[in-house]
Image: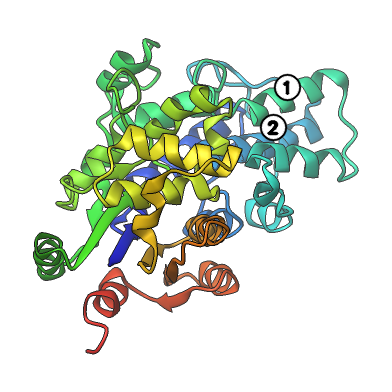
Amino acid sequence: MKILLFDMDGVLLEPHGYHDALKETVARVARALGIEGVSLTAEDIAAFEAVGVTSEWDSAAICAALLLDARWQVDPQATLPRRLATPLPPLDVPRPDFRAFVTELDTGLLEGALPGERAWRHLSRDGRAYTSRQRATMEAVLLNARQIEASFTMQVFQELVLGSRVFEEVYRLPSQLAGVESYLQTRDRSLLDDGLRGRLFDGLERGEFAAAVMTNRPTRTPDGASGTPEGEMGAQLVGLDVLPLVGWGALTWLAPRCGEGPQRLCKPSPIHALSALLHALGVPLETALDDAAALVLEGRPSERWGALHGAEAWVFEDAANGLFSLAGAQQVLARLGVRLNIQRVGISTSVVKREALAAAGARLYTSLSEGLMDALFPHG
């Protein structure tokens, strides 16, 4: 049995929505800090993703922290405004070198540290002399990057992503952007060729292989009680909304059941890939999540893992986290005597991302079509 696991952004989708929202968030935060002419480039974003900072919630907060640090060089008393409508007075502040900073981050994410923690650790030991007030402000920006109530950058980004109406409905927070339309709905583009989609569905129907989408995008929780349908919106755009989907909402549902934060359960954790593998085989999502957490966190196996023995799992990624997740799943299963063969497919045209993918053991392709052709037609 061949099992295909697809990342979404950068693989199934050309993520203009998220990337444009990130660029716009950074530009608006810069203006709120009185810093004009700041723009995040595609190369900056690729550098973040190459070192494992794949969530725009994290990269937006790190950029805000660097902008705040730059403002403090000339205005030590500055504070981050809580509303875009109340910016600080303009000052001539040099543009931070986002790319240089992020490439110096250590690999703490692989040891369990979140990107904001990594950034704060780097700033703290980089010779910067912060006052106690500045330290508290910087910690709040970086360590609360994924907390919608506390994070100014996350609020701006999510409103751009969802659109003002859905943002207010989901989060019960006031709009700052006055009627903006969803960037996901208006700017994303499918990367899945219609012919290959048809071939994929033919193979799924004949039982030649199984497939699932494994993404860190926010999704609805399995019980439908919370979460934002960003993963579902993306799957629908590429015509794969019938595939099993394991996203952020699934992991937030799992987190309190196993006493872990959801950020510890998603890629690069093997729990994410293990859940997606079982769900691809038709195991209900809640069961797949519980089984994966029990195996990784408690060493408690279920009989369902035997279905993966001898299977060949292909993961399609544009960043290394998903590759690490599947490789970790392979190692965990091997301890049970379950042999899972894996193929790591890296998809990117970015030099820095291709270097990171190659270092993680990926076979490199410039498009999803090329990689998927090798998976679906291994003999040409």
- Mark count: 2
Name the residue at 62% across, 28% down. 33
Amino acid under disc 1: Thr
Give the percent coordinates (x, y) of residue 305.
Answer: 41, 52
Task: State the residue position of label 1.
Answer: 137
- Whichever of callouts 1 and 2 sits on the residue coming sooner in the sequence is 2
Give the percent coordinates (x, y) of residue 143.
Answer: 66, 28
How crowded is the residue under tag 2: few (<14 C-alpha within 10 Å), some, or many (20+)? many
Name the residue at 66% across, 37% down. 116
Q: Is residue 234 above or below residue 356?
A: above
Image quadrant holding the C terminus, namely: bottom left
Q: Are marks 1 and 2 in contact (CB under 8 Å)?
A: yes
Task: State the residue position of label 2.
Answer: 68
Q: CA distance from mark 1 to mark 2?
A: 9 Å
Image quadrant holding the N terminus, namely: bottom left
Give the percent coordinates (x, y) of residue 126.
Answer: 86, 45
- On screen, residue 56 versus residue 282, left or right, reads right
Amino acid under disc 2: Leu
Give the percent coordinates (x, y) of residue 337.
Answer: 51, 62
Q: Nearer the viewer, residue 53 or 74?
A: 53
